Amino acid sequence: MTAVVELFIEFAILSFVAFGGATALLPEMHRVVVEQHQWLDDTTFTHLYAIAQAAPGPNVLVVTLIGWKVAGLAGALAATLAMCLPMSVIIYLLIDRWEGFAGQRWQKAISIGVAPLAVGLVFSGASLIAQAAGLGPAAWGLLLATIVINLRSKWHPLWLIGTGALLGLLGWV
């Protein structure tokens, strides 16, 4: 089986559990791409994620970059289509039925239950990237300080990003 077909199959399967977007799937993407298939190493995976986050646009760009790195343009197209197409088709076919169940107890339970699932998946993805980045004690301290400041103040996140960038440029983290 070619890498393009394998990319499509793997990302199509992942698309069914993409609650919270592609970022929520980072640990599983890492397992598939780095550990299972060994298409990329830890460093390359982390770099592709960083590039995807720095670029404007949706966070699913990381999938496109992984596909590109593994199998060129065909891999980029296969991975992106696999991540977006299956659930888009299912949602398109089911959305009218879902809305018809509005107000039903089980429908409310599913809607409420998916939110913490997405938050947990995104947190696990962030933990994976932090571990792969090899953060030292100062960087972990900066991370914790950023979380606390973000939760307890009205500062715009760009101030925190700028502070982190400055501390990195100075070599303090």
Image (cartoon, helix red, strand yellow):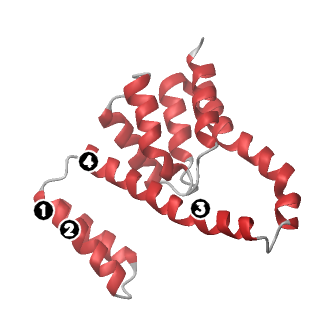
User: Of discs 3 and 4, which sits in the foreground?
Assistant: 3
User: In the image shown, does 123 or 130 lie closer to the viewer?
Assistant: 123
Query: Rounded to the nearest whole Å, what is the CA distance between mark 3 and mark 4?
Result: 26 Å
What residue is shown with label 3? 114
- Mark 4, residue position: 131
Q: Secondary structure at mark 1?
A: helix
Q: Which residue is mark 1?
A: 138
Q: Is the C-beta separation of discs 1 and 2 under 8 Å?
A: yes
Residue projecting furthest to the top: 1
Q: Nearer the viewer, mark 4 or mark 1?
A: 4
164 w.r.t. 67: above or below:
below
Is residue 130 shown above or below 76? Answer: below
Q: Residue at x 49, y 52 (%)?
A: 24
| Residue 70 in sight | yes
Q: Which mark is residue 128?
A: none
Q: CA distance from mark 4 to mark 1?
A: 14 Å
Report x, y in % for residue 171: 12, 59
Q: Secondary structure at mark 4?
A: helix
> Mark 2 vs mark 3: which is more N-terminal?
3
Q: How many residues crowd mark 4 within 10 Å: few (<14), some (14–19), many (20+)?
A: few
Identify the residue under disc 2: 142
Could you tell me if the residues under marks 4 and 1 are in contact, i.e. CB atoms within 8 Å? no
Secondary structure under the numbered disc 3 in the rendered image: helix
Quote the CA–CA distance across marks 4 and 2.
Answer: 14 Å
- Point out the frontmost of discs 1 and 3: 3
Q: CA distance from mark 1 to mark 2?
A: 6 Å
Q: Tell me which amino acid carries mark 4.
A: Gln
What residue is shown at x 35% (from left), y 80% (from top)? 151
